[in-house]
Image (cartoon, helix red, strand yellow):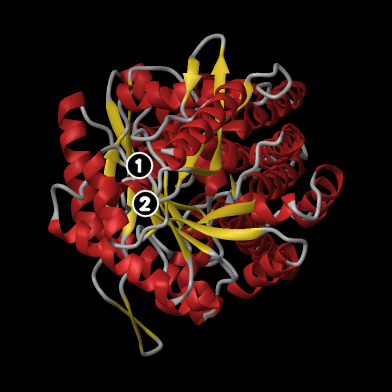
Amino acid sequence: MNRYSTYTLKKHIPLMTALSLLPGLAYIGLAWLHGIVMPALGWYGLMLLVSLWGWFLYKGYKPEQMNTADLKSWYTRLMVFFYIIFALWSLIFILYANETESKMHYIAIFTQLGAAVVASAILIADKRLFLPVLAILMLPLVVYFSLIGEWYGYVLAIFSMILWGVLFYASDNSYQMLQKNYYQAQHDALTGLFNRRYFVDYMDQLIKRVHYSNKFAYILLIDLDYFKTINDTLGHEIGDKVLIEVASRIKEFCGSNHVISRLGGDEFTIVSEEFEYREHCREISYTFAQKLLQRLKEPYLIDRHHLYLSASIGVNGIGRTSSEARHFIKEADIAMYEAKAQGRDGIIVFNEALAKRVEYHLELERKLYFALEHNEIDLRYQPQMNQDRQLVGCEVLVRWKNDKFGFIPPSEFIGIAEKTGLIIELGQYIIEEAFKTLKRWEEQGIVLEQFSVNLSVRQFFHVDFLGQVEALVEKYLTEDTRKKVIFEVTETIMIEDMYKIIAIMNKLRRIGIAFSMDDFGTGYSSLSSLRQMPIEELKIDRSFVNHINKYESDRLMISTILAMAKIFNLTTVAEGVESEEQFKFLKSKGCEVFQGFYFSKALEQKAFETFYLNNREQHHFEIGE
């Protein structure tokens, strides 16, 4: 039994009822004309009762209120309905097959052949129906012709058997084609699991069913970690074989109590059976996800490659709330991405706290689309000091003030901007406003040695990035000021196409712009990549500076970074300097530039200008002394 067979045959109940009752009236009329109406009336009465039962079956099909056992029971009754209604046509044939004097036997033969053709046409959705029903209809004809006792009777019997075979052949071919089309429409070609289309349809039915029955179920959304690396390094053929093996493990682990599908790529979903109690469902779902994750993490041997995979799993409950499948899938997807954000190789269950956090980020996303239009984006400038505490530069930082949420830190909205692509427009705005400020300061006599602007990886690889920067440099900066600009990139850029990165950086360096490696020591850098990257500066991440007084390992890390920078002839900048002790330690190890609250927070333009003048006056005063 599948949903296509069930739905198709259910639609044929009214059709079969009409094809039985209307010709049945003609039978009664013809029988009455020849004075043999009683058998027809008795037969028609039975047909009415069966048709009424069929109508109740038709109206009783409510998949949203029926579990798997109910559906199977309903389908069994449906099959019995078709068996009986076609058996009644064989009964009327038997009743009137010997009425040769009134010629009613011709009508009986014709209607029997017609019933066989109808059966072969409308019952092709299920082989368990059309195969027995054709036998019920054609076997009486073969026997009838064989019992005539004349040569033509045997010929007609043979022809009937041939027709029987032809009808079966046609029905079977149609059945095979329908099953193939149904399978292809509902299954993933690579793994043989159900596909997204089937999964969403099934979820819609399940949601209605659990809502009606006050039961619960759960959905797991599984995404393989770093699967792209396998495709990129070993090829898509190996990647496909990995997906097939993953699908096989999931099927083996789940057994027959779950519906499993591949949504696409390396994403899989699992929907459970139904549970009576919410807490039981929740406990089972998490335990089930843990055991499944362990199964998926067992080593893979694919074409002599030993591979080790992990997965991020989002879990979501389905129960007493009426909604759409995409709603629950989206929530499971949110939980899965939360698992990835927390380091991958884990399980997160969707809950209200996570929902509120996601809702907040969605609201931020909607507001961010209009932030530039509403002039809500502003720049701040954090002073950078040398070893003599003299102001030598600044880092340009972005701030967003919204009427509803107030000041929103970059740590919250920059990630959203990168995810949505708004970082391209936002990044261009930041660069242009920063260049305007640098030009204004040069005109006011505010001279800095360096002027740092942060770049997003996504912004860096945008197709128009080079052209936009070149145009802004030409518009706002002189030959002298452009040499003070430093673009800061994070270590995450190193997981991209290294050759493309270097090519873009070198083109920008030719127009005078330098590069700094921000947050150094926290991610992807290596000595080889550091040697290849055309950078002039390293920025020590604040996480190391914060713990100078606490961890010897962080002091050693900072010493190592500063020593490496000296080897590669790179300027060093320490972020997050908040105390005299931190400043003295960094200075003693050779760090050249410092920024942090110890010197100043990030300042608005006017405040920075005042800070610059005060610092210069103080520095001149100290020199004078």
Most foreground residue, 480 or 560: 480
Query: In the image shown, does 282 or 451 lie closer to the viewer?
Result: 451
**How many neighbours does mark 2 have within 10 angstroms: few (below 14), some (14-19), or many (20 or more)?**
some
Locate the C terminus and report the quarter of the image it occupies.
top left
Dividing the picture into quadrants, the one containing residue 24 is top right
Q: Nearer the viewer, residue 39 or 623?
A: 623
Residue 581 location in percent, x, y? 21, 44
The amino acid type found where label 1 is placed reads Gly
* Residue farthest to the top, as pictured: 403
Residue 512 spot, x, y in % from top left: 73, 61
Task: Give the foreground label among 2 and 1.
Answer: 1
Q: Is residue 271 above or below residue 520?
A: above
In the picture, the disc for residue 558 is none
Q: Which mark is residue 576?
A: 1
Q: Name the residue rendered at 54%, 47% in the picture.
A: 196
Q: Residue at x 48, y 46 (%)?
A: 2
Residue 459 placed where, x, y %? 66, 49
Residue 595 in view here: yes
Q: Is residue 470 above or below residue 426?
A: below
Left or right position of 127 against 283: right
Tags 2 and 1 touching, CB below 8 Å: yes
Task: Characterize the local packing of mark 1: few (<14), some (14-19) or many (20 or more) Cα atoms within 10 angstroms.
Answer: many
Q: Point out residue 127 in the picture as x, y percentages from the top left corner.
A: 53, 55
In this image, 498 relative to 483: left or right? left
Q: Residue furthest front?
A: 625
Residue 234 appears left or right of 101: left
Q: CA distance from mark 2 to mark 1?
A: 8 Å
Q: Which residue position holds label 2?
A: 541
Does the image show residue 413? no
Residue 302 against residue 18 in the figure, above or below:
below
Reading the chain from its start, which is encountered first: label 2 or label 1?
2
Q: How many marks?
A: 2
